[in-house]
Image (tube, coloured by chain):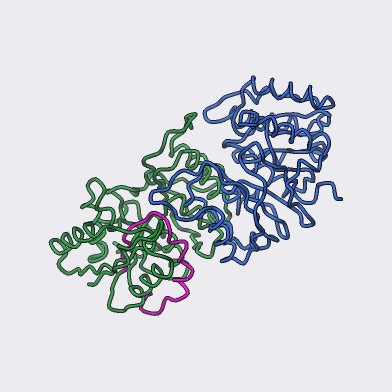
Chain colours: A blue, B green
């Protein structure tokens, strides 16, 4: 299968691409990775300016020669091109898989809203650079190439699933990218956010009437939380239980996702192999 | 007139209260400042726990012996009590003035939505501790006691006004605190936010259909912006022009508000002295 890689947010290094290509060649010989040159561009904060990032995404998504689009890396920037990209996606875009998380959540949200069926929250190419990152790359390729059950977040059950970065999800509510998650188990994770910010995001998320229609919320990992002054006095699990309790959203426990190498894959909807 | 001071977010020091009381006694002899003891409490991140903060707000708001409720300080925390407070406000609460900004924006938003008529975005007691903070205190007291025109943000004209911290406004959209600002000039300011965060908040704010009904947006000051790595490559004015342009919201120029001693007062709606 052919996997096209683009970077709607921030760039990756050529060295990272080469190492991930070598892993794929060694362990997933059926997978051909094609890095769009846009992955390595730099324009201000972003991997190229907006027309360039949007064009690269569309070249891969609308090419029936690719079976999957893999997000290179997060950071920030895909919300600036998401609507322009969504307006230009053709039939070939609907039949492929999309895998990413963090800032890629804006794109996944908009694609899910548009009825795309094979979307997943999971590791990206840039995760190679994390501690133990090879495991994240292998998990991503196992899902992309073999739809492997062991790669999936283990709590996935009968209800449809969806997963997002907390801040990203908060910031797409009420926008043209917001998907309908009624009846879904919503898994949320974050990185590098003060606990008061996570608390504030949970106020925003759980106060939203559309979000209150989810089947429940699961808490992924919140890592690299900066110290608060004064100390916030509560951890992420207490924050989630508090806002779920106030809003009447069932708190369903932990999810095995996060900004780390252990990040499991959460397909959106019911697109995983049923037993 | 009697001005009651409460702290729905974070506490102030007694020394700050004493100095502000001395300024009022010297320059605004008609004003009696009454600091609710809750202003000095500390519970985790907050000025007391939630029942205590809510009760203090209600004691002052529902007491017809007070002409105004002045917010002590921002920080974070009023979104946790806003709905409980709003549900218990009685007739005496509607006839008084409310003055604050930053985290107090959650309360002002909910009060405006509830039809309260004398609300303003402007300096708080804690601003005394800023450089030149005495001027901010004098401006607040000039508005509270004399409704003084010179205290007001100078661009205020025929359209109704409203002002918020960018992050706070973003995080109250879609919640029960969101006010209807159709036809309003919306002024926005922020402090200590990376420029990519401000850009992301502007995506969220200007993508919201209800916000697109405003008469226009004015940009206050964005101060203490942490360095981005890589550099974001655009300042706040470029960010505002970009998102206003994309969303069709008129960008009306700068507003003389911000997290500083020069922060002018923006009454909500049309509650300022007309010429």
Quadrant housing the N terminus of chain A: top right
- Left or right of A208, for residue B244: left
Where residue A49 sits in the image (x, y, percent)? 58, 29
Whether A243 is drawn above or below B127: the answer is: below
- Please identify the quarter of the rendering in which residue A84 is found: top right
Magenta segment includes B84 = yes
Whether B271 is drawn above or below A71: the answer is: below
Res. B195 in view: yes
- Give the residue at x 75% y 30%: A60
Give whichever of A195, A120 is nearer the camera: A195
Whether B28 is drawn above or below A191: the answer is: below
Res. A204 in view: no
Q: Residue furthest left?
A: B26
- Left or right of B129, for residue A81: right
Give whichever of A158, A238 is nearer the camera: A238
Magenta segment includes B183 = no
Give whichever of B54, B153 is nearer the camera: B54
* Range shown magenta: B69-94
Where residue A54 sits in the image (x, y, percent)? 66, 33
- Left or right of B31, for residue B110: right
Give whichever of A168, A43 is nearer the camera: A168
Q: Residue furthest front?
A: A132
- Give the residue at x 44% y 60%: B106
Where residue B142 sits in the image (x, y, percent)? 23, 61
- How many marks overall? 0
Where residue B53 sits in the image (x, y, percent)? 39, 67
- Give the residue at x 62% y 38%: A260
- Left or right of B98, for residue B128: left
């Amino acid at each position: 299968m052919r996997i096209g890689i683009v970077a709607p947010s921030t760039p990756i290094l050529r060295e990272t691409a080469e190492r991930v290509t070598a892993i794929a060649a060694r362990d997933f010989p059926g997978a051909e990775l094609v890095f769009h040159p846009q992955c390595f561009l730099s324009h201000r904060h972003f991997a190229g300016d907006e027309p360039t990032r949007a064009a690269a995404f569309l070249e891969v998504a609308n090419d029936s020669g690719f079976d999957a689009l893999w997000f290179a890396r997060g950071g920030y920037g895909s919300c600036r091109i998401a609507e322009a990209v969504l307006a230009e996606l053709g039939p070939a875009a609907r039949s492929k898989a999309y895998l990413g998380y963090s800032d890629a959540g804006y794109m996944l949200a908009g694609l899910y809203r548009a009825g795309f069926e094979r979307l997943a929250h999971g590791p990206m190419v840039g995760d190679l650079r994390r501690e133990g990152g090879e495991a994240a790359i292998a998990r991503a390729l196992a899902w992309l190439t073999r739809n492997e059950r062991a790669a999936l977040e283990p709590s996935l059950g009968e209800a449809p699933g969806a997963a997002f970065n907390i801040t990203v999800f908060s910031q797409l509510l009420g926008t043209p990218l917001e998907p309908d998650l009624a009846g879904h188990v919503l898994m949320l994770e974050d990185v590098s956010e003060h606990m008061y910010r996570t608390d504030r995001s949970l106020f925003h998320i759980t106060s939203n009437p559309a979000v209150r229609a989810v089947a429940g919320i699961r808490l992924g990992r919140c890592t690299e939380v900066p110290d608060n002054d004064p100390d916030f006095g509560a951890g992420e699990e207490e924050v989630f239980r508090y806002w779920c309790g106030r809003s009447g959203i069932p708190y369903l426990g932990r999810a095995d996702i996060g900004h780390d190498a252990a990040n499991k894959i959460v397909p959106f909807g019911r697109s995983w192999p049923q037993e």
